[in-house]
Amino acid sequence: MFCGNIKLINTDVVIVGAGPCGLFQVFELGLLGLKAEVIDSIRAPGGQCTELYPDKPIYDIPAIPVCSGEELTAALLKQIEPFDCGMHLGEEVRVVQPSDGNSFFVETGQGTQISSKAIVIAAGVGSFQPRKIRVPNAQEYEGQSLHYRVTNPSEFSGKKLVVLGGGDSALDWVIELAGTTDKITLVHRRAEYRAMSNSVKQMRKLVAEGVIDEINNAKVTEIRGKNGYVSSIAIESKEQGIIEVGADHLLVFFGLAPKLGPIADWGLDLNRKTINVDTEKFETSEPGIYAIGDINFYPGKKKLILCGFHEAALAAFAIKQRLEPDRKVHVQYTTTSPLMHKRLGVEES
């Protein structure tokens, strides 16, 4: 199993997932003097907050009235700087095996090998990919003028957009981009929307004002253009037949297809696409493996970042107790504890 030409990394905890909960887990472990290595298949930290909704406002982080997904990620990265965690991005965990009774051997698809005393799964919805549009030539335009997420809203300024979807993401971006583009056409396969009622109301108002166009009970049948750049979209409408709409960019929001990926093969007690945990330690059915955030399940579970932060704190104390079973783990406050100040790099006054 161990490759002689690959350096084995030794750490206290491996965290699978670099979203907000995974990053905060680094902080809570660091306060207790535990070192972590973070692994994520996405190539940037932040999870869904930066991968799918970097500019969407978040209002329910304690003491922060509003921040974007990118701003929250940046703040969490700043917060964990004192703890010098290892960050392995763009890598997927492929192997998790118990080793010598009290530790685990972890290996990624890129060959990174880590020995750890505990594992925390903070993988959000698991390994997820956007559901793609089923049009024969769609791949020709991906990455240039066909988008499944918005990373740079300014690139659509003054452009013609066609937005597909009827959920929160589609309507949120229609509302956000309205007035900054040359034209927006919203296309949905049904007349009813799955988005929040207030978003639907805002969208309807924009349609009534002529700011955006709306085509319901319709689907895209062809993307027209060349060299990866869209020029128009062919849309089949139940009421109007085939319509051709000019477009510079096509934004597709058909939702995500979440998959547990290799986690499903780790022998854990699963609840559909989530992992069952207890509410004292947030430990899975496998001793030494914990799960926090959207990936876990327990009675009363709420999929909120705030709840994931709470779970990370309790999991950290449980891991500390597991690693040092003969010592009582005391709660120390960052306001007054010299030890906490030392770990945080705070100078004593």
Image (tube, rainbow, N blue to C red):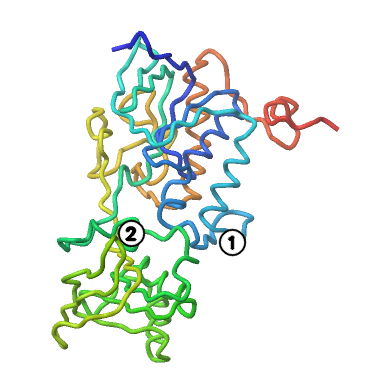
Rendered location of residue 6, percent (x, y): 39, 14
Rendered location of residue 126, percent (x, y): 32, 43
Q: Quadrant of residue 65?
A: bottom right
As drawn, is 134 to the left or to the right of 347? Answer: left
Tag nearer the camera, 1 or 2: 2
Task: Tell me the kind of residue under disc 1.
Answer: Val
Which mark is first along the chain, 2 or 1?
A: 1
In front of the other: 139 or 74 = 139
Q: Are marks 1 and 2 in contact (CB under 8 Å)?
A: no
In front of the other: 234 or 228 = 228
Task: Quadrant for the C terminus, please.
Answer: top right
Crowd band around label 1 with a 10 angstrom C-alpha radius: few (<14), some (14–19), many (20+): some
Identify the residue position indicated by label 1 in the image.
Answer: 66
Per the rendering, the mark at residue 148 is 2
Q: Secondary structure at mark 2?
A: loop
Q: Quadrant of residue 202?
A: bottom left
Q: Secondary structure at mark 1?
A: loop
Task: Quadrant for the N terminus, please.
Answer: top left
As drawn, is 207 to the left or to the right of 176? Answer: left
Task: Tell me the kind of residue under disc 2.
Answer: Tyr
Residue in the image at 46% along x and 24% along y: 13
Q: CA distance from mark 1 to mark 2?
A: 25 Å
Note whether 98 is above or below 207 in the view shown: above
